[in-house]
Image (cartoon, rainbow, N blue to C red):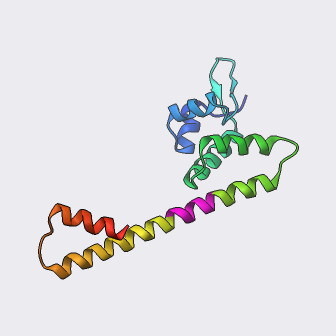
Amino acid sequence: MEGYLRGQIASMANVNIETLRYYENHGLIPSPIRSEAGYRLYSEEVLVRLAFIKNAKSCGFTLKEIRKALTASTASSVSIADFVALIDRKIEGINQEIAQKEKTKAMLSHLKSDLQASHKAPEIQELLDILHMKS
C-alpha cells in the first residue's frame, strides 16, 4: 500500500493536522485508506486538493464554496458557467472592497490635511465632526 501518513501529508501541504482532520470530516478531502496496521494513508490526490483549498482560500473563497467546486469538479456535468459566475462575484466583491478602502484613504488624507492646516490639536468632538463630514 502506498500513501502518506497524516503527519507527512500535513507537513508536505503545510497545514496543521487538525486542519487535515477538519477537511476530512467536512468532505473537502476524501477519507484515506487504511494500512494493514490501521494507519491512515493519504494519496497524492489529497496533496493536490489541499493545495487547491489553500489557494482558493487565499483568493477569498469560503470552505462552502470550495466544497461545492470540488464536488462539481468530480461530477460528470461540470458547468463552467457556474464557476465563472462564482469568480465574477468574487471579483465584484473585491472591487467593492477596493472602492471602500479608497474612500477611507481619501477621508483620512483630508482629515490629515485639515489637522495640519489648523496647527492645533483638535478636541474629540471636532474630530467626530470632521469624520462625519467626510463620510
Left-right relation of 131 to 103 = left
| Quarter residue 121 falls in | bottom left
Image-based side of 60 in relation to 116, left or right:
right
- The part of the chain drawn in magenta is 90-97
In the image, what residue occupies the spot 72% across and 45% down? 69
Nearest to the observer: residue 76 or residue 19: 76
Classify the position of the C terminus by image quarter.
bottom left
**Rendered location of residue 62, percent (x, y):** 59, 45
- Where residue 89 sits, quadrant-wise, is bottom right
Query: Residue 122: within the magenta?
Result: no
Q: Tell me residue 59's x, y (percent).
A: 58, 56
State which quarter of the image contains the N terminus. Answer: top right
Q: Report the residue that reaches farthest toward the right.
A: 76
Farthest-out residue, left: 120
For image coordinates 74% across by 58% down, the residue present is 84
Q: Nearer the viewer, residue 69 or 95?
A: 95
Q: Is residue 106 left or right of residue 82?
A: left
Image: 24 above or below 89: above
The question of residue 95 being in magenta is answered with: yes
